[in-house]
Image (spheres, grey):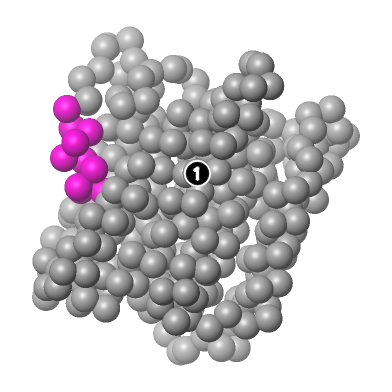
Amino acid sequence: MSSKSAIDGQYLVLMAACFYGLNPFFAQMLFKDGLGAEMVSLYRFIVPALFFVFFLRTPRASMTEAGRCLLLGVASGISIFAYFYALETISAATAILIYYSYPFFSVLIGWMVFKRTPSQNTLISAGLVAIAASLTIRPQGLQEGTLLAVAACFLAPLAVAIQVQYLSNPRRKIPTSNRMAWITIGHVLVLLPIAMWVSPAQVLPVSTSGVLSVLGIALLAAAIPQILFMVGAPRSCVDKNALIGSLELVVALLTGAIFLGDYLDRLEVTAMVLIVLALFIKQVKSESIDETVLEHRSQ
């Protein structure tokens, strides 16, 4: 892979991160419009599914890869519902910071599951992201009965971490549109039954801002960044992809502060500074940790 291709890939992943960072903003707008977490989650994926359903046709030789994408979509659908439920239940800043700890989990999963030994710089960057994500998680400030929402919220960074690791170097190459179709259908397969089981009192947005927020969360915060990531991720370094993704946290916190009036305290500002510092740490492949550590962890 040429250095120019890698840089182009990183820019695409960076753009995807900025768009993904809009998810909490649009979700909170829809909550204010009366929709629950189950409908917000469903709208995020069912609108793109209407477009990608035309790309489901897959050659028999690629059906195994399509099945993997479907499973990734199912896992992601469950986790995104848990994340939006947490956004609706606990402090938005806490839910956002839990979600955007996924670069740390990505490095760990890449190391322990995919056998990708991280460099020392990658471990330092991941550590900074983990510290940043932990700064505003204050258990003493949680209301009674919200611990389940907090625990469920951790499903989201785990699912995203697995997606980052796998999609950065999938086992078999298939067209991006085909891969997106199967992942998106996986989301809908799990989110539609959840919405039907919950039987929400409100299923449609009731205001113009609500309709625009549905389009925003489906297109700007889901379909467009997913395309950008799937095109850019295989061209870039897998660890860099995960760390660039932490920029989503900065976008999420800033949009909440600017457009929703969310207050950012000094810990949240510090978290953003740490993430920016992590992004500027150069990722190199040659400085990897001792292989005996990897062997010990994998036993």
The reply, left or right, for residue 122 in relation to residue 14 is: right
Q: In the image, is residue 49 part of the stretch drawn in magenta?
A: yes
For label 1, the residue is 15
Indicate whether 147 appears above or below 208: below
Nearest the viewer among 35 and 170 is: 35
The reply, left or right, for residue 179 in relation to residue 53 is: right
Q: In the image, is residue 32 part of the stretch drawn in magenta?
A: no
Indicate whether 166 appears above or below 273: above
Question: Residue 18, position in %: x, y?
Answer: 49, 51
Element marked by disc 1:
helix
Q: What residue is at 65 percent from the left and 65 percent from the top?
A: 272
Indicate whether 169 appears above or below 272: above
Nearest the viewer among 288 and 193 is: 288
Query: Three-letter amino acid code at disc 1?
Result: Met
Q: Main secondary structure of the magenta part?
A: helix
Question: Residue 19, position in %: x, y?
Answer: 43, 51
**Picture quarter with the N terminus:** top right
Determine the image quadrant of residue 293. Answer: top right
Indicate whether 117 appears above or below 242: above
**Magenta-drawn segment:** 45-54
Q: What residue is at 83 percent from the left and 33 percent from the top?
A: 288
The reply, left or right, for residue 6 in relation to residue 293 is: left
Q: What residue is at 31 percent from the left and 19 percent from the top?
A: 63
Determine the image quadrant of residue 200. Answer: bottom left
Residue 294 shows up from this direction: no
Question: Residue 195, position in %: x, y?
Answer: 18, 61
Residue 221 shows up from this direction: yes
Give the class, few, some or many, for how many residues have Cα within 10 Å of label 1's Cα (few <14, many ≥20).
many
